[in-house]
Each structure stands twice: as structure tokens, then as C-alpha cells.
Amino acid sequence: DIVMTHSPDSLAVSLGERATINCKSSQSVFYSSNNKNYLAWYQQKPGQPPKLLIYWASTRESGVPDRFSGSGSGTDFTLTISSLQAEDVAVYYCQQYFSIPFIFGGGTKVEIK
Amino acid sequence: EVHLLESGGGLVQPGGSLRLSCAASGFTFSSYAMNWVRQAPGKGLEWVSGFSDSDGTTYYADSVKGRFTISRDNSGNTLYLQMNSLRAEDTAIYYCAKLVGTSSFGPIDYWGQGTLVTVSS
């Protein structure tokens, strides 16, 4: 199984500042045949289901604010919130969909400092 | 608008069975792969099972393989999860999830609100 590891487990960022979340996979999730990284990022607020933010490692889902961006390739990925807003307080999860089982990372909790 | 409504959760004794349902609307259900994902209380997300529309292949996490069965009724726009031999560690909110395409090898773009399964004596 591909293990997905988040860092940090939690972080507190001031409003308007940058938040950076890292996700590392134990094996590459890059598929050379289509040049895609099989990696998604989700946001989950308390009491709500997750919401898709980013897929193929860097493609923003429709309707997601452009302060959210994804980067990385192979085994190392980053979700960046360029200017943290109050409504961004949530737990963020990465997920690989390269191979079964489609493991989620343990999540990073983002709070306001 | 895509809508996924889970039902069938509840309290069940260890060793018991439950069948979860997910009523889908707002999209052509037969054209998309579907997953079940669960979340134990206060914990992270765990992928449970998937059903590819492209070839009808089903997939399971090792933790549920042999005990859970995913199925779908395309004419009724409903996804199911039959859960047998339930254990305390199966206690979780179970989410029905739609994928972006026909293949299971893709991201989840819509989630239901979830149904709580509690396994306890």
C-alpha cells in the first residue's frame, strides 16, 4: 500500500498569511503514460463532508478560490493557501488514487493564530 | 445539482449486518464510478470500496475485504454497501462519493452527508 504522510499535523497561521501543507507518498503516484500525478487535496470543515480542492496535484476544482494551489510531483506534494481567510479553518487531506487502496493522508489541521 | 443521500446506518451488534444505500440524483449515475469512504469518530478519512463504471470492477480496502460488498442499481440510481460480520472498528460515518469519471482511478468530486454506523453490544 502507498502510505501518505502529512506534515505538519497542525499549523496556526495569521489571517492573510501563507499556509503550506505537505504530503509525501511512500511511492511515486506519477503515471508517465499520461504525465499525471494521481493526487488530490480535500478540505473538511467540522460537521461537513470533505470538499475537493485540487486534483491531478495542481488542477483547481471549479469554484475553489485561487488562493488555494497545489504543486509537486512524484512523491512530494504541497497545498498552499496564499492568504489565509477565516473560512479556511479546516482539516486538509491528501489522497492518492494511483493504486488500490486509495489511501488518504492523516490530515493537517489549519487554525488561525 | 448533484445530490447523494445515504441511508441505512444505525446501531448494530458485533457480528451483525447492515446495508447502506446511497440515492443519487442530478447526474447520469450510470456514467460515473462511485466509492464508499468512512470516518471513525474524531479520526481521518478511510477509503472503503469502489465501483468502476467503465468495466464494473469492484475494489475493497483490506480491512473490509470478504465482509463488505459494494453494488449499484443503475436503473434506480442507487449505490449500496452490504456490510457483514461487523466489528467495533467499523464504527464510523460512511460517505457515498462520486468520482469525476467512469474509472475508479480518479478524484472524488461530490460527497454525501454521510450515515453513522455504530457497532456495539
Image (tube, rainbow, N blue to C red):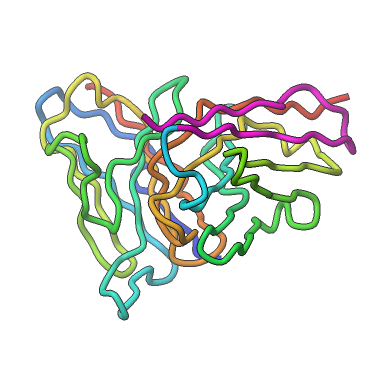
Q: Is residue B12 above or below residue B54?
A: above
The residue positioned farthest toward the bottom in the image shown: A33
Locate residue A66 relative to residue B46 in the image: left or right: left
Q: Nearer the viewer, residue B56 or B107?
A: B56
Locate residue A25 relative to residue B82 in the image: left or right: left
Q: Which quarter of the rendered picture does the C terminus of chain A lie within?
A: top left
The residue positioned farthest toward the front in the image shown: B75
**Residue A21 rendering spot, x and y as whole percentages:** 27, 45
Q: Nearer the viewer, residue B97 or A73?
A: B97
Q: Is residue A20 above or below residue B119?
A: below
Locate residue A46 relative to residue B42 in the image: left or right: left
**Residue B3 rendering spot, x and y as whole percentages:** 45, 29
Which image quadrant for residue B23?
top right
Q: Residue at x 67, y 41 (%)?
A: B80
Q: Residue at x 40, y 55 (%)?
A: B101
Which image quadrant for residue B60?
bottom right
Q: Residue at x 77, y 42 (%)?
A: B83
Numbered label tally? 0
Q: Is residue B79 above or below residue B55?
A: above
Q: Which quarter of the rendered picture does the N terminus of chain A lie within?
A: bottom right
Residue B108 falls inside the magenta stretch: no
- Magenta stretch? B1-25
**Residue A25 rendering spot, x and y as whole percentages:** 40, 62
Which image quadrant for residue A24?
bottom left
Give the main secondary structure, helix, strand or loop, of the magenta stretch.
Answer: strand
**Residue B99 rendering spot, x and y as whole percentages:** 44, 49
Q: Is residue B20 above or below residue B104?
A: above
Residue B3 falls inside the magenta stretch: yes
Locate residue A26 relative to residue A83 in the image: left or right: right
